[in-house]
Amino acid sequence: MGKFEPTGQKVEDIINNLASNRKIEDANILVDLYKRLSGYKPVVWYPGIIGFGEYTYETESGIKGQSPIIAFTPRKNKISLYIDRNLQDRENLLKKLGKHTQGASCVYVNRLQDINLEVLEEILIKSMRKIEKRENNG
């Protein structure tokens, strides 16, 4: 394993192996939120990413691949929320999100009580709409 693709692992196994009850609870809250918003069941992608839905992307250099429509990764120290770098109004939304740090395509949060879940919901909906629009316009 090593390629970015579904692993066949159970989502419950990933979540139940987290370090604390709070981390397990946060991950379950996110699974419920993402499932409700996307309408998809959670699937584990390599490496330990919990994704919802799937779409085909193509980079500017012509590389094609599959990716979850929305996803997060519960980790030992932080939760990684995958948020499109080019999402419209991204910086303003992140300012309203709450306590977080940023990586290349991730937003990292320590715990859900540090962020505004309504703002996260708005970000996820905008992300899904952007992907659906891209998919429908070919």
Image (cartoon, helix red, strand yellow):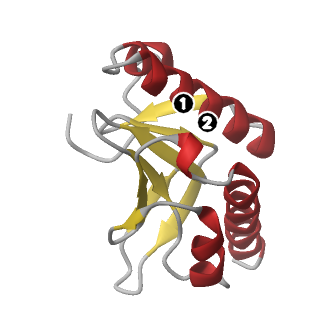
Instruction: List x then y, in percent, for residue 70.
Output: 59, 52
Q: How crowded is mark 2: few (under 14 residues within 10 Å), some or many (20 or more)?
A: many
The residue to which callout 1 is attached is 26
Q: From the viewer's perspective, is 138 left or right of 39?
A: left
Does residue 73 sit above or below 118 in this rendering? above
Q: In which quarter of the image is residue 29?
A: top right
* Residue appearing at x 59%, y 56% in the figure: 55
Residue 30's label in the rendered image is 2
Instruction: List x then y, in percent, for residue 62.
Output: 38, 80
Q: From the viewer's perspective, is 75 left or right of 80?
A: left
Q: Quadrant of residue 91?
A: bottom right
**Residue 59 visible somewhere in the drawing:** yes
C-alpha span from label 2 to label 1:
6 Å
Q: Which amino acid does label 1 sit on?
A: Asp
Marks 2,1: beta carbons within 8 A? yes
* Residue appearing at x 59%, y 75% in the figure: 95
Q: Nearer the viewer, residue 86 or 65?
A: 86
Q: Quadrant of the C terminus?
A: bottom right
Q: What residue type is labelled 2?
A: Leu
